[in-house]
Image (cartoon, rainbow, N blue to C red):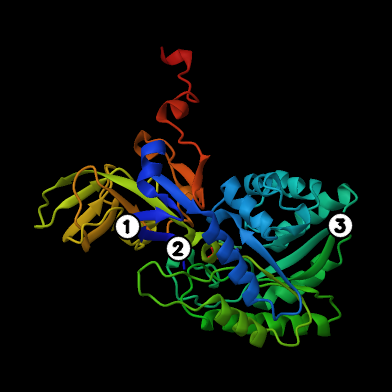
Amino acid sequence: MDHFTLRDGELHAEDVPLAEIAAAVGTPVYVYSRATLERHARVFKAALAGLPRAHVAFAVKANPNLAVLKVMAREGLGADVVSGGELARALAAGIPASDVVFSGVGKTGAELVQGLECNLGQFNIESEEEGLELAALAAARGQRAACALRVNPDVDARTHAKISTGKAENKFGVPLDRAAAIYARLAALPGLEMRGLAVHIGSQLSELEPFEIAFAKLGALIAELRAGGQSVTHADLGGGLGVPYKAGDVFPTPEAYGAMVARATRGWDCTLMFEPGRVICGNAGVLLTRVIRVKRGGNGLPFVVVDAAMNDLARPAMYGAWHDFDAVAPTGMRMRANVVGPICETGDTFAMDREIDALEAGDLAVFRSAGAYGATMASSYNSRGFVAEVMVDGPRFAVVAERILPATITAAERVPDWLD
Ligand SMILES: *Cc1c(COP(=O)(O)O)cnc(C)c1O
């Protein structure tokens, strides 16, 4: 459920006509609905209410905008971060360091120290090597870092290969059969407080079964560790719950996910941690764009050329992902068309041979469900700027990320005098 709806024939974000935002801020622009973000955070938390102890950390990489993080902070969510930059954002948005989980396979020494300096809640260690490095850094500072060991359960998440993270050949976590030995070795180091395990098998999962298989393996490992005398008080179950990108698609609800978790973790006696990203913010944003022109195509279908491109929304080019595409002021007329951006690459295609609202040059349209992995993956390819972001709250809206113009990017470049 989201708050992007037609009113009097015109698409609104909450109470604001999208056309008003386009007029004020220009296009392309991401538009987020505060009420939708808040609703999704609450629904997810409510779905876990039956669990004894649950901690929800929003996966910052899904949407790191400071205003979005502020909404999460106000809803009492922690943050799952994967870089020093994300850590700084989470803290800047007012998320307490104690509620921050630091994931990622390539945390640098400087990033580990940054995490120690702010005393963050939990490091999710992705390798024995990283654990040894963190232990030394923490001990040198007279600290003990709270840690979970991320395991790779070798489970097929049945999602796109590029966002599958729990197969043996993926770079994440340590193999299940070596996890107990690594845990024991790291737990003996004075710089670390090994307190649990973590697992995250991928993103945009459309079924609950892969989660359940992974959690069962985690449960067996917890029992094995405890039998070996180790303490396990925390289990981080990651994120990954998918969202429907196509109107009419049906996905497991947070309620069904919560019920599955309760079943799979019965008797664990752990604080359960969660790292949802997409399911919180995916449907809470749209990418608002204007049609530059409609060009006759060689396949018999017109090309609707919009002013948003693969640098603004990479998912279609990167994952072949589908985003519903709707006119802001639909006339009721439909057309079959290809929807493309202006970038000089065939990958800059949002849809081929799709039935869409009839559109003409100058019309506004939206790519829906663009609130996760949208602006955060933007680039300046083709010397386009960085897309602006707006948040709507009832009848008001604010620019929450200014458009970064190409000239600002060029201003950071230098031509050495030996090229003169
Ligand atoms: C990306 C990521 C998440 C969030 O995944 P979603 O599919 O957006 O829920 C959670 N945890 C880790 C470790 C991640 O890398």
Which labelled disc corresponds to residue 229?
Answer: none
User: Which corner quadrant holds the C terminus?
Assistant: top left
Q: Which residue is mark 1?
A: 8
Q: Amino acid at mark 1?
A: Asp
Residue 155 in picture, x, y percent from top left: 54, 78
- The quarter of the picture where residue 21 lies is top left
Q: Amino acid at mark 3?
A: Arg
Q: Is residue 134 above or below residue 248?
A: above
Instruction: Name the residue: 43% across, 56% down.
Output: 370
Q: Secondary structure at mark 2?
A: helix
Counting residues from the start of the chain, the first of labels 1 and 3 encountered is 1
On whether ligand 1 comes within 8 Å of the CB at mark 3, the answer is no
Q: Are marks 1 and 3 in contact (CB under 8 Å)?
A: no
Relative to residue 152, is residue 225 drawn left or right? right
Residue 248 in picture, x, y percent from top left: 35, 74
Q: Residues within 10 Å of mark 2 (few under 14, many from 20)?
A: few
Please state which of residues 209 and 133 is positioned toward the viewer in this rendering. Answer: 209
Counting residues from the start of the chain, the first of labels 2 and 3 encountered is 3
Counting residues from the start of the chain, the first of labels 1 and 2 encountered is 1
Q: Residues under labels 1 and 2: Cα distance?
A: 41 Å
Which labelled disc corresponds to residue 144?
Answer: 3
Instruction: Name the residue: 17% across, 47% down.
Output: 294
Q: Which residue is mark 2?
A: 162
Q: Is residue 12 visible?
A: yes
Q: Secondary structure at mark 3?
A: loop
Q: Residues under labels 1 and 3: Cα distance?
A: 59 Å
